[in-house]
Image (cartoon, rainbow, N blue to C red):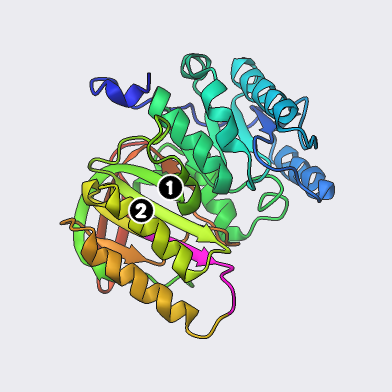
Amino acid sequence: MPRHFFACMKTLLPKALRKGDTIGLISPSSHSAFPERIARAILYLEERSFKVKPSTYLNCIDVNPAIADQQKLSDLHAMFEDTEVDAVICLRGGAGATRLLKNIDYALIEANPKILIGYSDITALSLAILAYTGLVSFSGPMIATELYEPTPYTEEHFWGMLTDPRYALSLKNHSQHRVTCLKPGDASGNLIGGNLSVLCSLIGTPYLPILDDAILFLEDVNEPAYRIDRMLSHLLNAGLLSRCRAILFGQFTGTPEKAGEDTRLEHIFDYYATQAHIEGPVMTGLSYGHIADLMTLPLGAPFQVTVRPRYFSLEARYPVIHA
């Protein structure tokens, strides 16, 4: 039974990373067609004084989903069971993580809490683990998509969030990502969200954490405006948007090049800022999504957000990792 049925249970925080710790690598979603990126990312981590432990089936390709699922689950469970592994970083997103959810050993993960990092399709894994265990995971850069050559902004957020318990107490947007205030206000709540398409696929399942009083953050890639509209209307019609205290729209990138597409997206976000019927703030422009300069966000942690026409702040209410 998902943990969110037990309101009295507390948020589960992982331990901060220290130099010399071991980082495990898994690929619960798609494989990477660029194995050289994996080697570069491993070197990057090792140069920063971390040990790296690739999983048994890292980047394996099997067209049979039943076999692939067994391999992915085996790697996930092995990394959380391994007492020498201090953090687990996913290879990349893509597809496939939702197939794993019903067979994950959540009790094993709850008994061995540690840092888990990934976004995009990994949203399914992070949300399910949060729903069943309360473990705060990190929606951020991955081995084959950013960490083989991270930008300074991505690098700062990644290491700051995972090594410094106080870093999350004040997060800064990238200077080139303009925040647009669609609805001003202040709100406090647990930071929940990720990829819009993946999150919507969990509606009606026990793997979506309750969104009551949440600060909802969303992004997507390669989705035209009409599909983003459809997914947001699904959240609205399911009564989920109205339960949130704030909505933070990140970067919606890679949409087909059609005349007026960006303008249509602006109107869509503005529409749902009104239709959500929440008292708290709604904004666009968060430095989060399929972008080079990527903010690392602690999914499930309590945050305070303030949005004004010329001001934005996002602050954890207390440290999101143990020292």
User: Start and end of the magenta stretch?
Assistant: 249-257
Q: Residues within 10 Å of mark 1 (few under 14, many from 20)?
A: some
Q: Residue furthest bottom?
A: 259
Residue type indicated by callout 1 = Cys
User: Residue 217: where, in percent of width, then height?
Assistant: 38, 52
Could you tell me which secondary element the residue under label 1 belongs to?
A: helix
* Residue 174 appears anywhere in the view: no
Q: Which mark is residue 66?
A: none
Q: Earlier in the sequence, mark 1 or mark 2?
A: 1
* 152 left or right, relative to 56: left
Q: Residue furthest left?
A: 279
Q: Quadrant of the C terminus?
A: top left
Q: Which mark is residue 234?
A: 2
The picture quadrant where one finds residue 135 is: top left
User: Residue 22: where, in percent of width, then height?
Assistant: 66, 27
| Residue displayed at 57% across by 62% down | 291
Residue 118 vs 156, above or below: the answer is: above
Whether pointer 1 and pointer 2 mark residues with C-beta atoms closer than 8 Å, the reply is yes
| Residue displayed at 24% across by 58% down | 306
* 307 left or right, relative to 123: left
* Residue 96 appears anywhere in the view: yes
Q: Quadrant of the N terminus?
A: top left
| Residue displayed at 43% across by 32% down | 207
User: Residue 37: where, in percent of width, then height?
Assistant: 78, 49
